[in-house]
Image: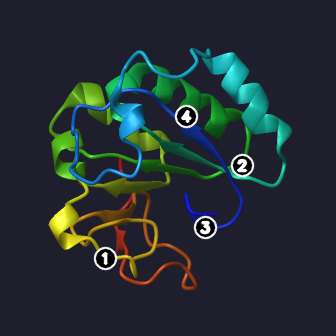
Amino acid sequence: MADGPGLRTSIYCAGCKHACKGCHNPQSWDFKAGKEMDVEELLDIIKADDLSDVTFSGGDPFYQVEAFTQLARRIKEETTKTIWCWTGFTLEEIQADAHLAQMLPYLDVLVDGPFILEQRDTDLLFRGSPNQRIIYLHGAPPEDIIPGTVALEPLR
């Protein structure tokens, strides 16, 4: 429940170059850490839980954008689950790079931006510093959703 609203299956990836001072998960920076899993194996785990939506975190999933795009596409084709994704990149950086942007159409929510220790705020929901944004990528969220979020016009 800390990785987005409601019950979630969280996929934590290895590898991050942002190296944010005060990161809550610095052990995930190593690209060789963790257990290698293929998309099919992860999809089986995700589909086995009928109640949980999905979260991509890390590390940073955008450093493995091809695999996470493939997984996100399959989740959207084969389930009704929502996908939240955390990244140290900003939405603008992702949109400016076609390689990174390939995953955006399959994500429902992007929590973007690096964690800034000097701005740490433990009262924020689902993020550690106020520069990080909760962005609904495909239009306005339901009215009962998290206050202070950003809703974009649907991506094309």
The answer to whether residue 152 of the structure is visible from this angle is no
For label 4, the residue is 72
- The residue positioned 55% from the left and 34% from the top of the image is 72
Q: CA distance from mark 1 to mark 2?
A: 33 Å
Residue 151: name its quadrant: bottom left
Q: Which callout, 4 or 3, points at the residue further toward the start of the chain?
A: 3
Identify residue type, mark 1.
Asp
Amino acid carrying mark 2 in the image = Thr
Which labelled disc corresponds to residue 5?
3
Residue 144 appears left or right of 43:
left
| Circle nearer the N terminus (3, 1) | 3
Q: CA distance from mark 3 to mark 1?
A: 19 Å
The residue under the point 36% across, 27% down is: 15
Identify residue type, mark 4.
Ala
Residue 137: give x, y in percent of width and height.
Answer: 40, 57
Cα distance between the residues tagged 4 and 2 = 12 Å
Q: Could you tell me how far apart the alpha carbons at marks 4 and 3 are, in whole angstroms?
A: 18 Å
Q: Is 128 drawn above or below residue 55 in the view shown?
A: below
Helix, strand or loop for disc 1? loop
- Is 115 left, or right, of 118 in this rendering? right
In the depicted view, which residue is nearer to us: 118 or 37? Answer: 118
Judge depth for marks 3 and 1 and give the one in front. Answer: 1
Residue at 84% over, 48% down: 50
Residue under label 2, please give it: 80
Instruction: Please tell me which of labels 4 and 1 falls first in the chain.
Output: 4
Q: What residue did someone put label 1 on?
A: 121
Q: CA distance from mark 2 to mark 3?
A: 16 Å
